Image (spheres, helix red, strand yellow):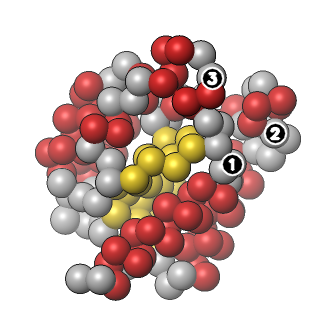
């Protein structure tokens, strides 16, 4: 099984930005965490991050026929990008949406997620562990087929 983890804008600033919300661990640590969590589950894990909406869409498109699942933290694009939603719909790959913080307990504008309209599951507020939970969900889903 192969899973592609896609992270959006400002995730590359983990460990620097808003430490009271996101903690001290940096993006490199998140990538290492995801790869190790995947390895534990027998999953080949690819991690990708971009601050550019179009590059995220291109990455989603490149997953077509090449990956069994997508885990996406679209960052701020979660609340604004119909285009990312449409890209996910176009490739029709099982998707789990992940957020490090609980977006439902934050500012009002963060409570609206376009990604949730397509994602099979949304995991919020569990930090890095949310990515492992998403992998577990996708793996278990695959086992049920």
Toward the viewer: 93 or 55? 93
Mark 3: secondary structure: loop
Which sits earlier in the primary sequence, circle 1 or circle 2? 2
Of labels 1 and 3, earlier in sequence is 3
In the rendered image, residue 119, in percent from the top left (x then y), is placed at 32, 48
Q: CA distance from mark 3 to mark 2?
A: 16 Å
Label 1 – label 3 distance at C-alpha: 15 Å
Point 41% across, 59% down: residue = 4
Q: Residue at x 44, y 68 (%)?
A: 137
**Residue marked by disc 1:** 127
Residue 23 - label:
2
**Residues marked 1 and 3 touching at CB (< 8 Å):** no
Q: Are marks 3 and 2 in contact (CB under 8 Å)?
A: no
* Residue count near mark 3 (Cα–Cα under 10 Å), binned few <14, some 14–19, many ≥20: few
Q: Position of residue 106 (x, y in %)?
A: 62, 23
Q: CA distance from mark 1 to mark 2?
A: 9 Å
Which secondary structure lies at badge 2?
loop
Q: Residues within 10 Å of mark 2 (few under 14, many from 20)?
A: some
Quadrant position of residue 68 = bottom left
Task: Between label 1 and label 3, give the one nearer the viewer.
Answer: 3
Residue 48 makes an appearance in the image:
no
Residue 92 rendering spot, x and y as whole percentages: 18, 54
| Image quarter of the N terminus | bottom left
Mark nearer the N terminus (3 vs 2):
2
Given contact means CB atoms under 8 Å apart, are the residues at marks 1 and 2 in contact?
A: yes
Where's residue 27, x and y in %?
Answer: 69, 45
Residue 71 versus residue 55: which sits nearer the camera?
71
**To which residue does mark 3 refer?**
106
């Amino acid at each position: 099984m192969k899973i592609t983890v896609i992270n959006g804008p400002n995730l590359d600033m983990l460990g620097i930005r808003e430490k009271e919300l996101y903690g001290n661990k940096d993006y490199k640590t998140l990538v290492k965490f995801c790869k190790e969590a995947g390895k534990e589950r027998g999953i080949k894990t690819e991690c990708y991050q971009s601050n550019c909406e179009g590059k995220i869409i291109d990455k989603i498109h490149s997953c077509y026929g090449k990956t069994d699942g997508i885990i996406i933290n679209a960052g701020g694009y979660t609340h604004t990008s119909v285009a990312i939603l449409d890209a996910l719909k176009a490739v029709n790959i099982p998707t789990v949406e992940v957020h490090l913080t609980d977006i439902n307990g934050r500012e009002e504008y963060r409570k609206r997620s376009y990604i949730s309209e397509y994602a099979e599951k949304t995991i919020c507020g569990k930090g890095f562990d949310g990515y492992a939970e998403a992998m577990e969900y996708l793996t278990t889903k695959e086992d049920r087929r």
